[in-house]
Image (spheres, grey):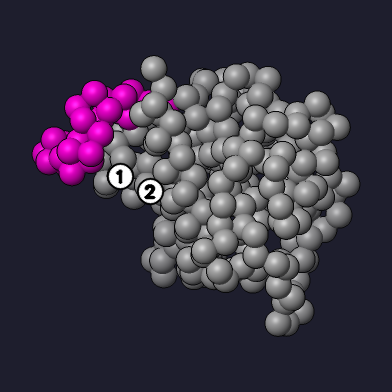
Amino acid sequence: MEHHRFERLELLVGSDGLQRLRNASVAVVGVGGVGSYAAEALARAGIGRLTLIDFDRIAASNINRQIHALEQTVGRTKVSAMAERCLAINPAADVRPLEAFFSADTSAELLAGGFDYLCDCIDSITAKLHLIESCKNNGIPVISAMGAANKLDPTLIRVGDLGRTQKCRMARIMRKELGRRGIRSGVKAVYSLEEFRRLSAEAPQGEDTAADHRPRVTLGSSSYIPPIFGLTMAGEVIRELLETP
């Protein structure tokens, strides 16, 4: 059954490529609108070891954009629901769901196993900064999602070095704060060139988004932009794993 499960992929990447993906260990940090789709694509690509890290539970408001968010999964932890999906896709995979918030206090433990690649899909800039810095210090390749909320145009999504991103407010903050930490290049990012879109209604405040812990306004989100971000991230990871000697 496993051979048939990935036979179409094997036609594309060959048996050696399929084995390389089977031997890979990838972490997805933040299993929301971006991260859930990244995890799903990685599972469907036969990644052998997937680590899913998130502290949150599925809410009804997640249903419009998160692949594990369904009427019957509301209230479950995101990592447990996503791990179940990944194992239903590939029972032979080693899927580790870690219900944890990535921070300076938890980073050493969460990154201890080492990974061939890490997908940064978290929202909090404070946590993103520490995650990227930790990956750089530990030699873990990382791809980071910038602002996927408040966007409607999928044709403006781009992949590039974070140091050269344009028009994304989150990326601007990240460039500035990472520069203060001596990191000015070498971090791949998925971002959008779409101009800032004003909210159509007043929204509540959520967790911090800036390095000074100012609260952020909850932004609107479509059913397709966060998933495209996640699928794009998975595609970049898979291509690089296949190209790595």
Q: Residue at label 1?
A: 44
Amino acid at circle 2: Glu
Is 197 positioned to the left or the right of 10 in the image? right
Q: Quadrant of residue 9?
A: top left
Q: Position of residue 3 (x, y in %)?
A: 13, 35
- Find the distance from the CA under tag 1 to the CA under tag 2: 6 Å
Q: Nearer the viewer, residue 234 or 62?
A: 234
Q: Is residue 9 magenta?
A: yes
Instruction: Specify the amino acid type for callout 1.
Output: Arg
Mark 1 vs 2: CB contact within 8 A: yes
- For the C terminus, the quadrant is top left
Which part of the image, by quadrant, shows the N terminus? top left
Badge 1 element: helix
Where residue 52 is drawn, which disc sits there? none
User: Which residue is located at x 49 percent, y 45 percent?
Assistant: 233
**Residue 117 higher or lower than 176, as above or below:** above
Residue positioned 53% across, 33% down in the render: 118
Q: From this view, report whether residue 17 is shown above or below residue 86.
A: above
Asked if residue 18 lies left or right of residue 70, the reply is left
* Coordinates of residue 145 in the picture (x, y in percent): 60, 47
Q: Can the viewer see residue 144?
A: no
Write the start and end of the magenta stretch as one range.
Answer: 1-25
- Corner quadrant of residue 23: top left
Q: Residues within 10 Å of mark 2 (few under 14, many from 20)?
A: many
Residue ID at (78%, 49%): 172
Q: Position of residue 64 (x, y in %)?
A: 49, 70
Left or right of 25, for residue 142:
right
Please tell me whether residue 142 belongs to the stretch shown in magenta: no
**In this rendering, does residue 191 appear at all?**
yes
- The residue carrying mark 2 is 40
Residue at (31, 24) in percent of width and height: 20
